[in-house]
C-alpha cells in the first residue's frame, strides 16, 4: 500500500526531536508493509484509524485506491480533541 501524508503530518514529524522523529518515520514506513499498532476509532471518528507510536498518534484512513491517507498527527493527550475540532470546523466552512 502507498502512504500519503497530509502537510500537517509532515510539519508535525519535522517538529519532533531526532529520536521520536526517527520512530514516527519508521512507523509510517511500516504502514506500507501492513505493520503497525493500528486500531479503528469509534464514535464521531469511526471512519478513521489511529497509528500508535509511543506518546504520539497518527490519524489515518484507508482509501479505495489502496492508499493510506495520514491526515493528522499529534501527542496522544490532545490528538482526538484537536482532530475532531478541526473536522467540525472544516464541515462548517464547507456548508
Image: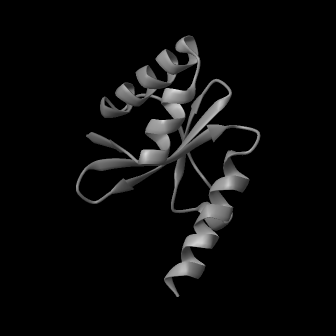
Instruction: State whether residue 15 is above or below residue 18.
Output: below
Residue 42 visible in the shown view: no
Image quadrant of residue 27? top left
Of all residues shown, which one is farthest toward the right?
Answer: 77
Q: In this orientation, which residue lies closer to the viewer: 16 or 4?
A: 16
| Residue shown at the point (64%, 23%) measured from the top left | 54
Q: In this orientation, which residue lies closer to the viewer: 67 or 23?
A: 23
**Left or right of 31, for residue 2:** left
Of all residues shown, which one is farthest toward the left?
Answer: 65
**Left or right of 89, for residue 1:** left
Of all residues shown, which one is farthest toward the bottom?
Answer: 95
Q: In this orientation, which residue lies closer to the viewer: 6 or 35?
A: 6
Instruction: State whether residue 19 is above or below residue 61.
Output: above
| Residue shown at the point (62%, 39%) measured from the top left | 74
Percent x, y of residue 92: 60, 80
Percent x, y of residue 11: 48, 37
Image quadrant of residue 63? bottom left
Instruction: State whether residue 30 is above or below residue 73.
Output: above
Percent x, y of residue 77: 76, 39
Percent x, y of residue 25: 43, 24
Residue 51 visible in the shown view: yes
In what quadrant of the picture does the N terminus appear? top left
Q: In this orientation, which residue lies closer to the viewer: 49 or 15?
A: 15
| Residue shown at the point (55%, 71%) measured from the top left | 90
| Residue shown at the point (53%, 88%) measured from the top left | 95
Instruction: State whether residue 58 is above or below residue 71.
Output: above
**Left or right of 78, for residue 67:** left
Amino acid at each position: 500500500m502507498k502512504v500519503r501524508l497530509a502537510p500537517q503530518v509532515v510539519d508535525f514529524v519535522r517538529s519532533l526531536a531526532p529520536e521520536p522523529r526517527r520512530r514516527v518515520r519508521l512507523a509510517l514506513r511500516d504502514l506500507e508493509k501492513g505493520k503497525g499498532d493500528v486500531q479503528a476509532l469509534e464514535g464521531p471518528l469511526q471512519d478513521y484509524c489511529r497509528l500508535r507510536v509511543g506518546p504520539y498518534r497518527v490519524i489515518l484512513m484507508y482509501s479505495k485506491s489502496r492508499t493510506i491517507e495520514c491526515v493528522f498527527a499529534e501527542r496522544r493527550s490532545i490528538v482526538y480533541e484537536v482532530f475532531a475540532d478541526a473536522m467540525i470546523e472544516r464541515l462548517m466552512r464547507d456548508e
